[in-house]
Amino acid sequence: MNKSWMLKAGVAALAAAGFAAPALAGPVSEQMLAQDPADSWLHTNGNWAGHRYSTLAQVNTRNAKNLKVAWMTSVGAKTDSQATPLYHDGLIYFPQDNKVFAINADNGKIAWRYEHKLPEDWGGYNVPFFTGKHRGVAILGEYIYFLSNDNKLHAIQYKTGKGAWVKSYEQAGIVYPKDFSRSGDSNGYISTVGPIAVKGAILLPMNGTDTGGLEGFVLGVSPKDGSLLWKANMIPRPDEPGGDTWPPGSTTYGGAGPWITGSYDPDLKMYFTGTANAYEWNPKNRGGGEMDNVGAASIVAVNTETGKVQWRYVGVPGDPFDYDIPQTPMVITIDGKKTLVQPNKTGYIHHLDARTGRFLKADRFSDRINWISGYDSNGRPKDMLALPPEGGDPIEVAPGLLGGVNMYPNAYNPNTGNIYLAATESSMNYGFEDIKVISNVRHFGAYQEFNFGDEVDKAVNVKSGKEVWRDTQAGKPGYAGGMLTTAGSLVVYTTQGGRFTVTDARSGERLFELDTGIAAKSGPITFMHKGKQMIVQPLGGTPGFGRDEAHGLEFGHSIIAFTQ
Amino acid sequence: MLCLVLMALMGLATPLMAEDEIPEVNPFTGDAKAIREGRSWYRNSCSPCHGGRADGAGERGNGADLRKMQLGFRGFVQLVLDGRQIQGRTQVMPPWRGALKIDDIYRIGAYLETVAIDGANWKEGVKH
């Protein structure tokens, strides 16, 4: 046994015992951000690669049955709680309702609260629905970075909650949506997605898609003062590849906003993000479904040093079904190749070469798919459904526009080789109408009637694409709030119906469960606090999508911490 | 009032009708063209929250089940104009005054009458 091997074995043993990294307190360095989560949870998606995998193993398949509630708390949420929290240095950071809360991991008490007030003329198409929702914050140095709904970046001292600075990007064209009964120009961007801290920059996804269709961007800004470093357009300009897949003039309101935090590869210096649907939903102004509308319903790679888009892959050409593919593309090395793996609304798990964007394969994970028969070797859909006529009868489309998976995060465990999906079975009756306009806000020109199926939480082997296990919530529509997986060989999630669940990552056997009575809309995290591994699950929101009879639950909110 | 009802029956409701003159009954009830237009407005502006079936199953949260509307026609119009707060919640029914034309609100109502189920009282104004 040589010394190098002994050292590795020792590190592995420490990792298995939950001591993968030293207990790092104090300001967060880029080096800390580059690690897989251990003591702290520093990224919305756990690590830059988007795995939601913790190296902790103090809680594991042998002892998960001993979990107990450590504390419960509330931040008084007034809408869905969608954020995955962060944890660092004794505090849990959680954005809700245009506030950020720091919660003491000892007891669940609120250590500090930071509040932002939205502008007086805030409003517009679909805006009441989005208001107050947030899907994460970032941390770097001494600051929590928070994007309020009106697209302002707030740097907040992580220990005290004191605001250091606030930066608006209106001068870069990132305006907020306005009450369309009082404004002649009501289109705007709403930030519900959180920022991500990468080497040298904070990245801000900017989405205005379903509030009127302003085109999507990713902004790179300075961590020091929020000043703009670059602005990457999701929709290609006419002289870029794919620029000819939009009719002239159709991109201004073309949508394609990024609305889920993406992934980052420090070696390739690329940020990978999925994008929203093309706008309007009715495709008649953007090629009628016959033009690809590259950049919308796409995966886009951005060089994080220059802001230059490296490549775009369109997963739903001409997206006529509001599928969009915004999900986090996970960076996974498969057979020595850095691969982007993205389970998305289409019902497939897309595999792309991370460096080039070349399509590798698409593994089907939804039971029922009728919008296409599959993807060809070039990554183009085969046998896409014929579109219904405007004003005519709707057609059934499966999956429905809520998707095989939606915004509720998935996870990847490098030990099992499985990805864990917060999936559902559903379809929709989908039809087109003429496109109405209020103020200058173009509406969808389309509508859907949902046909809900069961929530299906499942494990799929990433390499083979084969399902390993599933946990079906029979008769219960919706999605789990999000998946977490650990080196303790666990998968943790809470069903839409509020059942906090810990399973064996390999078999799917349920090891621990607690019926919380509150719907879950966010992913859990895990971290080490004072020598004990804790799991924190935010809960809250209205169960299902408007029909809560199946769950028998009302709107609620709580944050629950578990430990042994 | 009788005059308004007669105008409504004759399909002569004016698009410039003031909001404080909301008729007791919907001037577009049963008007196929108005229902078609109302459906289009409904599907663009209302269905995101209230669902394509008007049953409250919208992608944008759970709006009220409009098939069971029990506000009567005037109550419906007034609520659309003024909006509605939901205690303890951020999500609201936004006020559509100044955004939707009053006749288009009537047309939306005429469409919703066609999907009403037991318990709805769209026709309440007729009794007076």
Image: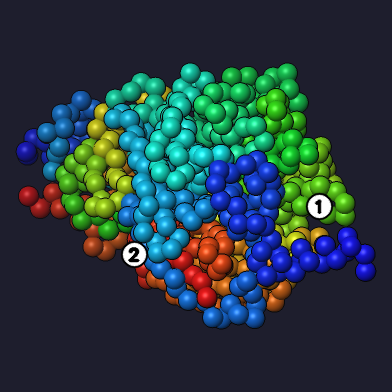
Badge 2, how many Cα within 10 Å: few under 14, some, many 20+?
A: some
Badge 1, how many Cα within 10 Å: few under 14, some, many 20+?
A: some
Residue A384, image x and y in percent? 70, 47
Residue A366, image x and y in percent? 66, 61
Residue at x 15% of width, y 29% of height: B18
Residue at x 54% of width, y 72% of height: A501
Where residue B109 sits, quadrant-wise, is: top left
Could you tell me which quadrant the N terminus of chain A lies in? bottom right
Above or below for A35 versus A249:
below
Residue A399: tell me if it is visible.
no
Secondary structure of the residue carrying tag 2 is loop
- Amino acid found under the numbered disc labelled 1: Thr
Front residue of A40 and A318: A40
Residue at x 8% of width, y 35% of height: B3
Asked whether, in this view, residue A193 is left or right of residue B114, the answer is: right
Residue at x 46% of width, y 50% of height: A93
Above or below for A175 versus A487:
above
- Amino acid found under the numbered disc labelled 2: Glu
Above or below for A412 versus B29:
below
Asked whether, in this view, residue B74 is left or right of residue B39, the answer is: left
Q: Which residue is mark 1?
A: A333
Mark identifier at residue A554: 2
